[in-house]
Image: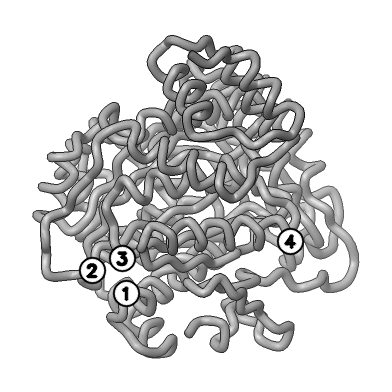
């Protein structure tokens, strides 16, 4: 019998925990045998002391096997799962999943709720009236067979230990910890049964990995875990130094994703759309459906322009009980009663946007949680209408605040204006992606000369 305080102390002092000790603490917390405050103390010890490679792999397998394993029957096509480590305005799964399904892949996409200042795909999807994210393993398999994809949360029978830790990390300031992120991400991917895993590791002010070196470390850790589990894994390290696209907030992000699929997106969504195309392009390369980036990118563009991805998204919404009318009319999504434009105070170019603060402002408006039991207001949030490099003047709104009350809107607007750094002259270019890390774990970083456009080096994706 293990004494939990001794396990916590061992990690606090920098020791390596064995499987039995990790199981006693994590599974004990899951089953109510260990109180949350002790698990939280261990999380904080891990945050400061880290974990060895063996500990990280062990924790991953404990989380993976804490519930039912998803078994997708043979479908005659590649089965791929996609995951992002999270960022401000990151709604790529809402476009990439139906886009890849329309290209012939099977996508059992399991997602989480919002963490800290970033939104969660499950919270976004639940802004669609009636949309179910709590499918059972059997329902997931059936829908992937019938529709080609699903967008679901962590149901009670799939990786429940990770769902438990996920909620605690969100409210204990232990989110941005490489071993905890890696174990959380890969446990869901491995339990999901996909043979191919595509990962998007965010780096920058609006991510949990502000340092590029830390992001590369996390990416390599994810690839190593995938390789040990026998799964084909590829990671893109992408930029989150400004909000991704236009919407920051649940219904706002779903609306933007739908408009990209409908080919009615605004210029503010261009960077978001470009990243969706790059992720989907590398997925076709990873699964062998295409042999070079140019052909893969052309195929993705054609599929997006044809409307096939939109129809797959519609089929997903219908299959999961959602109101499919939102696909044709996103205004049917929840709407905030107060919308307040935020304009620049002078003339110049946007040199930087504090993405993290934008995310925190959205949380304060009600789009995220401060405690794990907090409800989420799907209607509120922020629309970012201008991005780094854009010319601004007082007559052009930088953003919009979508709030419940006039008071909340004006307070948020004052703080939001301070998130934009406007100055003279053209700013430094911000690449979309920094590196592509394939199964070998060797990062193919993007040379400075290849950063225009997508920012992804062709030589880095072999």
Percent from the top left, x then y, of residue 294? Answer: 42, 89
Q: Is residue 405 left or right of residue 167?
A: right
Label 1: which residue? 287
Q: Earlier in the sequence, mark 1 or mark 4?
A: 4
* Residue 132 shows in this picture: no
**Circle 2 residues within 10 Å: few <14, some 14–19, many ≥20:** some
Q: Quadrant of residue 427?
A: bottom right
Label 4: which residue? 213
Q: Are marks 1 and 4 in contact (CB under 8 Å)?
A: no
**Circle 3 residues within 10 Å: few <14, some 14–19, many ≥20:** many
Q: Are marks 2 and 1 in contact (CB under 8 Å)?
A: yes
Residue at figure coordinates x 84%, y 63% from the top left: 348
* Pick the front one: 344 or 361: 361
Residue at figure coordinates x 77%, y 34% from the top left: 415
Label 3: which residue? 99
In this figure, which colouring scheme has been used for the structure? one colour
Q: Is residue 199 left or right of residue 193?
A: right
When the figure is inspected, residue 433 is found, relative to residue 362, above or below; the finding is below
SS at mark 2? loop
When the figure is inspected, residue 458 is found, relative to residue 394, above or below; the finding is below
Q: Earlier in the sequence, mark 3 or mark 4?
A: 3
Q: Are marks 1 and 3 in contact (CB under 8 Å)?
A: no
Q: Quadrant of residue 276?
A: bottom left
């Amino acid at each position: 019998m293990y004494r939990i305080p001794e396990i916590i102390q061992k990690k606090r002092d920098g020791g390596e925990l064995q499987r039995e000790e990790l199981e006693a603490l994590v599974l004990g917390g899951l089953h109510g045998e260990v109180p949350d405050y002790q698990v939280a103390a261990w999380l904080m010890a891990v945050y400061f002391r880290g974990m060895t490679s063996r500990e990280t792999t062990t924790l991953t397998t404990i989380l993976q096997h804490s519930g039912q394993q998803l078994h997708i029957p043979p479908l005659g096509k590649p089965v791929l799962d996609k995951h992002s480590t999270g960022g401000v305005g990151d709604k790529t799964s809402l476009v990439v999943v139906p886009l890849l399904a329309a290209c012939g892949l099977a996508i059992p996409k399991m997602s989480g709720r919002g963490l800290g200042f970033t939104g969660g795909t499950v919270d976004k999807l639940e802004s669609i009236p009636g949309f179910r994210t709590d499918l059972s393993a059997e329902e997931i398999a059936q829908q992937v067979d019938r529709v080609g994809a699903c967008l679901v949360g962590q149901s009670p029978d799939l990786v429940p230990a990770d769902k438990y830790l996920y909620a605690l990390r969100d409210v204990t300031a232990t989110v941005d910890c490489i071993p905890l992120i890696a174990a959380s991400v890969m446990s869901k991917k491995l339990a999901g049964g996909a043979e191919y895993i595509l990962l998007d590791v965010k780096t920058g002010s609006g991510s949990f990995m502000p340092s590029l070196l830390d992001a590369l470390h996390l990416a390599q850790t994810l690839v190593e875990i995938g390789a040990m589990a026998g799964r084909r894994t590829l990671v893109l390290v992408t930029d989150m130094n400004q909000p991704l696209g236009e919407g920051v907030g649940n219904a706002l992000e779903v609306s933007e994703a739908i408009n990209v699929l409908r080919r009615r997106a605004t210029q503010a969504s261009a960077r978001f759309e470009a990243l969706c195309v790059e992720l989907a392009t590398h997925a076709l390369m990873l699964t062998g459906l295409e042999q070079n980036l140019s052909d893969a990118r052309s195929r993705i563009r054609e599929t997006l322009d044809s409307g096939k991805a939109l129809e797959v998204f519609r089929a997903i919404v219908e299959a999961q009980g959602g109101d499919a009318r939102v696909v044709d009319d996103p205004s049917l999504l929840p709407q905030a009663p107060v919308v307040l434009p935020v304009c620049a105070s002078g003339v110049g170019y946007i040199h930087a946007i504090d993405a993290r603060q934008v995310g925190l402002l959205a949380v304060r408006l009600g789009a995220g949680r401060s405690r794990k039991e907090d409800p989420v207001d799907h209607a509120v949030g922020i629309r970012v209408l201008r991005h780094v490099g854009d010319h601004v003047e007082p007559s052009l709104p930088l953003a919009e605040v979508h709030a419940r009350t006039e008071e909340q809107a004006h307070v948020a607007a004052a703080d939001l204006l301070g998130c934009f750094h406007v100055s003279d002259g053209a700013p430094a270019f911000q690449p979309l992606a920094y590196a592509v890390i394939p199964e070998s774990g060797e990062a193919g970083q993007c040379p400075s000369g290849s950063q225009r456009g997508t920012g992804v080096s062709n030589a880095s994706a072999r």
